[in-house]
Image (tube, rainbow, N blue to C red):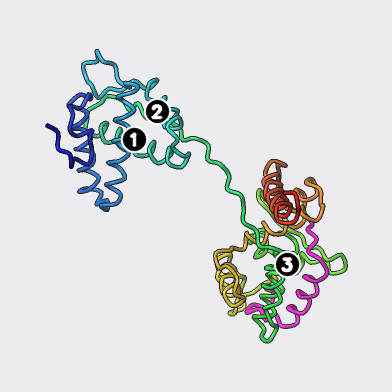
Amino acid sequence: MPDENTNDTRESRVSPLPEAIETSFAGFLERMKLERQCSEWTTKAYREDLQTFARFLEDVPAFEPTAANSLQFDPRRLRRYAGWLASHDFAPRSVSRKLASLRSYFRYLRREGLIDSDPAQSLRNPKQPKRLPEPLSETQILKLLDSIVPDSILAVRDRAMFETLYGGGLRVSELVGLNLGDLDIEEATVLVRGKGKRERLSPIGRTAMDWIELWRGYRQPVIHDEPALFLNWRGGRLTTRSVGRTLEARLQAAGLPIDASPHSLRHSFATHMLDRGADLRSVQELLGHKSLATTQIYTHVSQKRLAESYRIAHPRS
């Protein structure tokens, strides 16, 4: 009579898998735990992934039943595993992790000489869905900028820096790469060097340029001919990491979510432009995107915000 307290009913029946596979599972987990010093949590994740693979083998045998070596899996059948996972409601990220575990398992078999070739080499991860960016609202942006009181040289720099980052929708790498010679004060534009060394003239707005002008009066480079526009406290060019740390401190001081990044200001710029009626092609040019498809992700954000506004405001929603 079966034990009613058994947690896993699969263990109470004879496994339909060949004994060699069950043994190889155990050997693989032992190797991960001892030689690679995987944590208990990681080992548990590997074990669960192998159990999922075992369920797949019950439904869709991935090895030739007549093969002399029961560990010699058929690559064509093995490629069905990703589809099987998706049909059982595993999310794309979970599918990718389980396939990664399976690739590790087969590499182990190959190193141990238990199989002649690796059938998992043809396994490909599913395409991951793009995460929609979480922009700051216009109110939050204004709260951040207005909270930076120009009571010190670094405060003036920070205000100019974040006004520029948001005003032009720049990448943080583009911001720290700006030089004094890239400024067009009259036109309130900057020459930006983007990805792939592509250059573009980016309008940043009169407000940002006025703050840059104020910052230039305080700017003290450690080297006389230092070209960088924005400097650290030692007088050298800022790094992207320094900008991230500075933004986190400013967000915290303003009582705003500190998980926002410099890239969040770029996301916010694009979303607010579209919210206010800018056309997609113009935003593409302003962001320096090579493909329009890259810019289109922001339309989903704007549509989501629009739908939420409708739901809140419309009496018949």
> How far, Cα to Cα, is label 3 from label 2?
49 Å
Percent x, y of residue 198: 71, 50
Of mark 1 and mark 3, the one earlier in the sequence is 1
Circle 2 SS class: helix
Q: Amino acid at mark 2?
A: Tyr
Q: Nearer the viewer, residue 230 or 77?
A: 77
**Left or right placement of residue 14 versus residue 172 in this view:** left
> How far, Cα to Cα, is label 1 from label 2?
10 Å
Residue bearing mark 3: 164
Quadrant the N terminus occupies:
top left
Q: Residue at x 45, y 29 (%)?
A: 87
Of mark 1 and mark 2, the one earlier in the sequence is 2
Q: Which mark is residue 102?
A: 1
Please tell me in which quadrant of the rendered image residue 63 appears: top left
Residue bearing mark 2: 81
Magenta stretch: includes residue 208: yes
Of mark 3 and mark 2, the one earlier in the sequence is 2
**Left or right placement of residue 301 versus residue 273 in this view:** left
Give the residues in magenta. 201-225
Q: Amino acid at mark 3?
A: Thr
Residue 184, compared with residue 100, is above or below; it is below
Q: Residue at x 17, y 27 (%)?
A: 14
**Dot 2: within a 10 Å radius of its alpha carbon, few (fewer than 14), some, or many (20 or more) residues?**
many
Magenta stretch: includes residue 9: no
Mark 1 vs mark 2: give the one in front.
Answer: 2
